[in-house]
Image: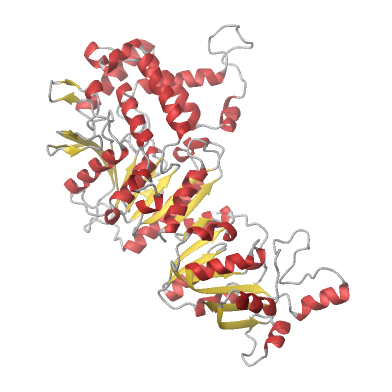
Amino acid sequence: MNVNFPPRAVRTTETPRVDLLLIADMVKPGSRVLDIGCGDGTLLRILADKQGVDGRGIELSQAGVNSCVAQGLSVIQGDADTDLVYYPDLAFDYAILSQTIQATYSPRHVLEQLLRIGKRAVVSFPNFGHWRVRTELLLRGAMPRTDNLPDRWYDTPNIHLCTINDFVDLCDGIGAKIERAVALNANGYKLGVAMPLFAQNLFGEQAVFLLSR
Amino acid sequence: MSETPAAHAFTHHSLRLKQIAEPQSEIVHFDEPLPLDCGTALAPFCIAYQTYGTLNAEKSNLVVVCHALTGDQHVANLHPVTGKAGWWETMVGSGKPIDTNRYFVLCANVIGGCMGSTGPSSINPANERPYGPDFPVITVADMVRAQARLLDHLGIEQVLCVLGGSMGGMHVLEWAATYKDRVFSAVPIACAARHSSQNIAFHEVGRQAVMADPDWCQGRYLDEGKSPRKGLAVARMAAHITYLSDDALHNKFGRRLQDRDKVTFGFDADFQVESYLRHQGMSFVDRFDANSYLYITRAMDYFDLAADHGGVLANAFAGTKTRFCLVSFTSDWLFPTEESREIVHALNAVAANVSFVEIKSDKGHDAFLLHEPELFDTIRGFLSAAARHRGVIFPANGAARP
């Protein structure tokens, strides 16, 4: 099947992505999961194969949806910003938003919706506080472009980038409890849990948060 | 030398009438009355159906296909009247997306139809004459109730998948809403949870065309030995336009002329599109009954699943465990994507297991009947997953039919 995906918000070379494996580890086996922005269904497949999860997906790109459904995954075409309101409270054990929140119009609203429809939310995003990002702006005086965030300012789908610090602030602001937070370095390895927040914010290229109400 | 048009029409007419009483299909007679939404009951009644493939020992591999307004049970075999291939032979068969090596496929003619299930051209036991306008007005729910009786008769409790497009999609929704425990998975294609005002309007044009034909004889044309061919052909022509798209018509015909170099300044079929529509109209009347057209369009007009459930569509699906896959087509303006999306939102509201695929096509509503590889991939993948989740054991090749 020839599937043309739109530009990805985040480009990573590993297959499967390390952040997806990390997310899969945060999900209890046999639970009900909604994967928002499920792309070609990689995470849903990992969750079904490794954890026996009852998974559903929402994906913006129709090509991604069609490819998922042809593989037997339960996926609908939809938009994180507008379509989460149709789900009832606590419909899922986990609502997952992987590498998508920075591309939504209203991240705060989306995060609140995640915590309404899921008992827990798992959110991963590229950390704009990473030292490479900081040096791009500091030394080049231009909007940062890195291996992880390769698009130019005018063609990026990432309209609401944030740092790990910013995200923690938002969680505080909406009363979300952070159950786990993991930062990954550029090679996809977990940074030490003992590392203080400011250091994670400096050296973490991506972050994965497990949240609850 | 080929037969004359009149002889051709006569041959088809008699072949068609034969299908009403003695269909080339399996047929089951029911004496116990079928209660109808209009308040009366239909008794006795019969259902004509076709099957393909083999029912497994657990009776768990049944796929019910629901046909559209002018379709019938001849999904994947030569049509007994037209001699043409079945209407979904691209989808159903050995190695096809609905693979008859794996699934036992059943399609029943709807009640109100004209291919062997009881309809307005069947004999009314009260007076031994064709029902005609005395046939009760039926609904989509009545049609599905009749199908459920057929499955009871066959001793099949749960269907692996109910699947259909257009009016067939309405049947799928009705099945899933009314018989939640009997439907493991459901694929409503190019349909809506209610018939829109615009669609009712088109149907009304078609019905008025039929009824304006003097040969309709107030619905008693069979008694009079007549047939409202012109009225029904016009109805079909108008309806056929709604099944296509502007682009599809333009690509197929443009403004090209039919067997001539310039317009004739008359009302002959100058344009290819006119000739095409006339042909569609005339070939339709060879195989379809005018009163069935009235009754079945009416059933679609009355369909409003939310209204049947307190005005809230989600209520129709409350507590459902059925796996759903909805499909729509970008150029379908008869049942546009928004109608499918509304159903998806209702299913989301009850946290149902739902997939939704919108397929890019310029072929309009008819796309579901045509060669659409993405539709094939979707159905094949969804059906395989449903069978896997249900633990279906596929029948060994060459096993005896039930």
Pick whichever, A100 or B252, lies toward us.
Answer: A100
* Left or right, residue B307 beside residue B155: right
Where residue B353 appears, x then y in whole percent?
Answer: 41, 60
Decide if residue A205 is in sight here. no
Pick whichever, B364 or B124, lies toward us.
Answer: B124
* Left or right, residue A8 beside residue B363: right
Splitting the image into 4 quarters, where does residue A40 fall? bottom right
* Left or right, residue A60 beside residue B139: right
Pick whichever, B323 or B273, lies toward us.
Answer: B323
Where residue B9 appears, x then y in whole percent?
Answer: 34, 15
Where residue A97 appears, x then y in whole percent?
Answer: 57, 69
Above or below — where is B256 with respect to B174?
Answer: above
Colour pattern: secondary structure
Pick whichever, B316 or A3, lies toward us.
Answer: B316
* Left or right, residue B318 beside residue B45: right
Splitting the image into 4 quarters, where does residue A88 fall? bottom left
Name the quarter where the N terminus of chain A is drawn: bottom right
Above or below — where is A74 with respect to B74?
Answer: below
Splitting the image into 4 quarters, where does residue B291 fall? top left
Point 45% across, 32% down: residue: B199
